[in-house]
Image (cartoon, rainbow, N blue to C red):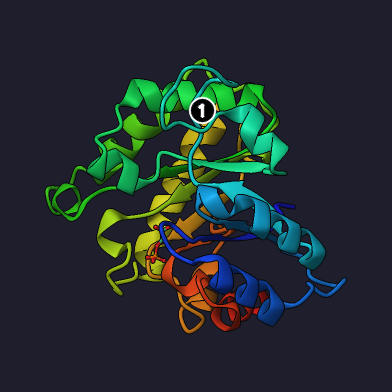
Amino acid sequence: MRREIIAGNWKMNNLTSEVETFFKDFGALSADTKRQVIVAPAYPYLKTAGELARECGIELAAQDLYPQPEGAFTGMIGSKMLKDLGVSAVIIGHSERRHILHEPLDLIREKVRFAQEEGFHLIFCVGETLEERQSGEMLNVLTTQITSAFDNNLTAAPEMVTIAYEPVWAIGTGVVATPEQAEEMHSFIRKLITEKYGYGDSRILYGGSVKPNNINGLISLEDIDGALVGGASLKAESFRALVNA
Ligand code: PGA
């Protein structure tokens, strides 16, 4: 059984008072919550958020990781700092880093390797742009993103390796993939990671304009094991609704 995950990626949002309000309003997860619940605050808020998250039963993720423990890497955050702050999961390869920062495949691969070596739960993001979808390239794009990061590079247990399929055209746009579109991509990813790596038990999350009113149509599908949520994770009320959906 793959345990479902609801993960919130706060990106460059939520200041101290908003972080505090979020956890106060969210409250503690009830003992019968079966889903794994994770939030990824921006780096400066990991300490505040981490303490409050722990009291609520929520796990702490970082939005990225530089693949070194510590050292002379100006502006980077490595594994020692993240562990010091209680971070247990890291998001790698988010489309905003791939596209805005032009993060190269070999750096993403190195982050994937290092995150596993350091014992973090890896949340690895993939997804095609609208152009790539319209030109029919989307399955090739996913294959390249996955194989360039995973070939001869998977060392962690499958439950510590999660993939988030996030079509770039659905992120922050309000345009959610239809359940059929999402399931087609998820089942393709499931087949690929099962046949190529034996990682069929890894979880595959959908991301891109997930809201309380559309999550059920997605999460009920065979190969969708949860959601990675941006906008709707910023406020406790909608994040709660997603966790309880
Ligand atoms: P969104 O972001 O929910 O705001 O579309 C999703 C993501 O980028 O993880």
Q: Nearer the viewer, residue 24 or 208?
A: 24
Q: Position of residue 127 (x, y in %)?
A: 33, 47
- Horizontally, residue 229 falls left or right of residue 31, namely left
Q: What residue is shown at x 51% (from left), y 15% (from top)?
A: 152
Q: Which residue is mark 1?
A: 112
Q: Position of residue 236 (x, y in %)?
A: 60, 78
Q: What residue is shown at x 75% (from left), y 77% (from top)?
A: 27
Identify which amino acid the numbered label 1 is placed on. Val
| Residue at far right of view | 31
Q: Is residue 145 above or below residue 89?
A: above
Q: Ligand 1, what quadrant?
A: bottom left
Residue 6 image-quadrant placement: bottom right
Q: Secondary structure at mark 1?
A: helix
Q: What residue is shown at x 63% (from left), y 37% (from top)?
A: 82
Q: Position of residue 211 (x, y in %)?
A: 46, 77
Could one spot residue 198 in this view of the protein?
no
Q: Nearer the viewer, residue 79 or 232?
A: 79
Residue 36 image-quadrant placement: bottom right
Q: Is residue 76 above or below residue 9?
A: above
Q: Position of residue 158 (x, y in %)?
A: 66, 35
Could one spot residue 118 in this view of the protein?
yes
Q: Is residue 233 above or below residue 82?
A: below
Q: What residue is shown at x 43% (from left), y 57% (from top)?
A: 11
- Horizontally, residue 201 falls left or right of residue 150, namely right
| Disc 1 residue crowd, few under 14, some 14–19, many 20+, Cα 10 Å | many
Residue 125 image-quadrant placement: top left
User: Dividing the image into 4 quarters, which one contains the C terminus?
Assistant: bottom right
Q: Nearer the viewer, residue 80 or 74?
A: 74
